[in-house]
Amino acid sequence: MEPTNHHADGATKVELIAATTRAPAADKAILFTGERGSGLMIDAVTISIPPDAKREIGQVQWPKRLPPDPHKEFATVAVDPIESRQEGEAWLKTHVPESRRVLVFVHGFNNLYEEAVYRFAQIVHDSKADVVPVVFTWPSRGTVFDYNYDKESTNYSRDALEDLLTQIARNPAVGEVTVMAHSMGTWLAVEALRQMAIRNGGIDPKIGNVILAAPDLDVDVFSRQYQSFGDKPPHFTLFVSRDDRALTLSKRISGNVERLGHIDPTQEPYRSQLEMAGISVLDLTKLKSGDPLNHGKFAESPEVVRLIGDRLIAGQAVTDSAVGLGESLGAVAIGASTTVGQAASTVISTPIAIFDPRTRRSYSRQWMLLGNSAGNTLGSAGEALIPAQP
């Protein structure tokens, strides 16, 4: 993470805030260790990303040696400590885009500091999200053998994340906040929001959207957490995948209770519960991934990353048209606006299934209007896709 003076024509710079509860490292090239620090430390970090023509979208081109080659590798350009709340507020004010949106990312299990920062920079760049990027990185030792240590580190960091979210939401320059978390980081994010709701009687209304990718959360516990959010919770979107091997292992070592990121959203009781709560679900089970554990699909798939930038951060309803039918990505949408012809093409083979209860009624109306002309060809598919109307 030591800044380099080398630059590359065509490279893109991503400026972000990195907030951490990790302990500082003696080696400035590392910046922070996997041990627990005494408080929250914040830096303004600038990352250089190679030209798109020289990289695969959805992937981080990790430096093979130091200093990195910015022509083909990610590189740190600047690290500037933010030493007061006033400095942080000023940085936010000068970097807030026209959308006035902030995206706060909480990484998952087994992540070093630099891995969390570079991965988030990749997501921001590839999604083309019009946001101020903030990554919250907690003390993970970056090894699969420290699962329990990492889990306790998320608990250790709850207060700090809650305070960070509160301060961001209170900034007058900020209009809306989206929280996106991955894997074990979803526990930390949901717990911080739960604390905020209990402490203040609800979650700050500026926090309008929460995206949980491959959530390593006990489904029973999440149900109770969600109930604590009050009458006006943020809109939640889940990325799930039944072939996620990391969550399969987590389930085994957690009393064999299903993990939230491993559910089949078409099956009961999940289907009804998700619809009642208004929670959107993107099922990535059929989406191919270069990750042998199938645990990082949300960040590695160019289509999903674009969807994050185009729709989810803005809290828009997700439909099949939003992810580009006719391209390499298909979608079956329960409650999503579509046509019978489109549904026919996607029922057969679909990498992603989308379940968005907010547009369910629109979908049902279109199906009824077009059903007669379609005959009985799609009758069984329609019954399977559309839940009974209350």
Image: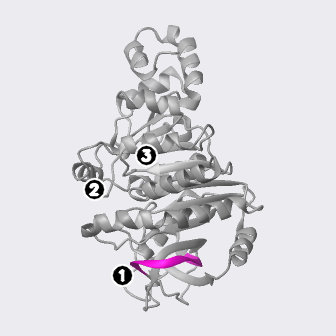
Q: Residue at x 22, y 49 (%)?
A: 252
Q: Which of these two is toward me, 80 or 225?
A: 225
* Amino acid residing under circle 2: Leu
Disc 2 target residue: 293
Residue at mark 3: 239
Return the mark for residue 64: 1
Q: Is residue 267 visible?
A: yes
Q: Is residue 377 magenta?
A: no
Work out how far the residue at label 3 is from the one at label 1, CA to CA, in angstroms: 31 Å
Residues packed near mark 2 inside 10 Å, few (<14), some (14 to 19) or many (20 plus): some
Above/below status of 349 relative to 204? above
In the rendered view, tell whether residue 85 sits above or below residue 236: below
Q: Residues within 10 Å of mark 1 (few under 14, many from 20)?
A: few
Residue 140 appears at what percent x and percent y?
Answer: 38, 71
Q: Secondary structure at mark 1?
A: loop
User: Residues under labels 2 and 1: Cα distance?
Assistant: 23 Å
Q: Nearer the viewer, mark 3 or mark 1?
A: 3
Q: What range is drawn magenta here? A: 33-47
Give the residue drawn at x 70%, y 74%.
91
Which numbered disc flags the more N-terminal residue, 2 or 1?
1
Eye-nearest disc, 2 or 1: 2
Main SS of the magenta part reads strand
Indicate left or right for 254 with 320 as reference: left
Query: How many numbered marks have been drawn onto this rendered protein structure?
Result: 3
Q: Position of residue 191 (x, y in %)?
A: 48, 54
Image position of 369 (left or right of 144):
right
Q: How far is mark 2 from mark 3, CA to CA?
A: 15 Å
